[in-house]
Image: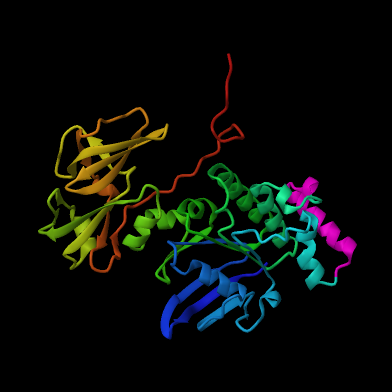
Amino acid sequence: MADLHIENLTKVYNVHSDPVVGVDDVNIELDEGNFLVLVGPSGCGKSTTLRTVAGLESATEGNIRIGGEVVNNQKPKDRDIAMVFQNYALYPHMTARQNMGFGLKMMTDLSKSEVDERVEDVAETMGIRDLLEDKPDELSGGQQQRVALGRAIVREPQVFLLDEPLSNLDAKLRAHMRTEIKELQQKLDITTVYVTHDQTEAMTMGDKIAVLNNGELQQLGSPLECYHQPANRFVAGFIGEPSMNFFDVEYEGGRLVNESLDYPLSDSLQSDIGNADRLVLGIRPEDAVVANAPDDHSVVGSVTVVEPLGSVNYVHTDVEGEEQIIEVDGNQYADEGQRIAIRLPEENIHLFDADTGDALHNPDVTDETIGHSEFEGGFGEATSD
């Protein structure tokens, strides 16, 4: 186990003699045992960053430090890392046991019995000990994924790298494997970097998430920091499902104004805006409220679609030609074409500079922890008659 520092990392490709920047001056510090998720849209530079850490790509500028040591010039096999790929990369002619032990056999002086012992220990942890004599085509997708993870874990690396390892699994198995990987990482306490384009995976798995776009690091922080305190409009729109609602507005005389809004701001919020006059108001679907009647902090929209999800419904509305989504209780419904007032409480709104995209104001969020009571479970002691 070791810390990982990515320092001023830049990767430039020459495509038909034209430079293409894949990663642009990225800085990330990851402490020992932490779980970092690199997240962003396709082509944002997350896999390039991971491959550079692994040594599969060379850095144009900057350093990769593992355990304090610069490893830029080291071959992948000498960096003491293990990597899991999107396609599992299992040898089809080998059993699960042989696949898991192959790296140890080729790269260490361990005896066959020592390799087998380590493979069996990891297979027990992964819940696949009874599958060790099966070949990949005899295994399900989830079982193949466990073998691929086991092959990486058995090497006991300092850093564990995973490149979209769950993308080939169905939705239910993905959710299950997310939990398994997180629990396993916490148990092994291995410094881990995980690449995904799925922001749900990023939110549920990472101690930290690094949001990238166009090769640039947009924000590095805890999942809840990136969700509640986005650094800019891109992060606000990318993190969260459904996405944050946005309204382009002008700032005039203490009010936010557009075709659908004439929104007065409190003095304290006005002080956050500074000299900006073109702004973007953002609000998450769960923070907007369906009101009985319009007021100064509301817009009016026409219902276009209602998505029922059981505990909640997502109500899609048309507000002056822009789609805005509101989350309501699962027992609330609306008819297509129905006009509704959508209140945007000032304590819930985000404000961004329209020109730079930088966040000017984010709502204050108070963390609440499930407390302990006399009952050991913390939710209050059950009673019976």
Residue 312, quarter of picture: top left
Q: Is residue 365 left or right of residue 168?
A: left
Of 233 and 88, which appears nearest the observer?
Answer: 88
Of 239 and 307, which appears nearest the observer?
Answer: 307
Residue 57 position, x and y percent, is 57, 77
Prevailing SS of the magenta stretch: helix
Q: Is residue 354 left or right of residue 253?
A: right
Q: Is residue 139 left or right of residue 196?
A: right
Residue 211 position, x and y percent, is 44, 63
Q: Residue at x 38, y 57 (%)?
A: 238
Residue 259 position, x and y percent, is 12, 51
Q: Is residue 178 above or below residue 294?
A: below
Residue 110 position, x and y percent, is 85, 68
Residue 354, quarter of picture: bottom left
Colour treatment of the image: rainbow
Q: Residue at x 24, y 45 (%)?
A: 344
> Was residue 137 drawn as part of the magenta stretch in this picture?
no
Quadrant of the rendering where the C terminus is positioned = top right
Quadrant of the rendering where the N terminus is positioned = bottom right
Q: Residue at x 14, y 60 (%)?
A: 251
Of 116 and 16, which appears nearest the observer?
Answer: 16
Q: Which residues are magenta?
A: 110-131
Q: Residue at x 57, y 24 (%)?
A: 382
Q: Is residue 19 above or below residue 172?
A: below
Residue 230 seen from this side:
no
> Was residue 119 drawn as part of the magenta stretch in this picture?
yes
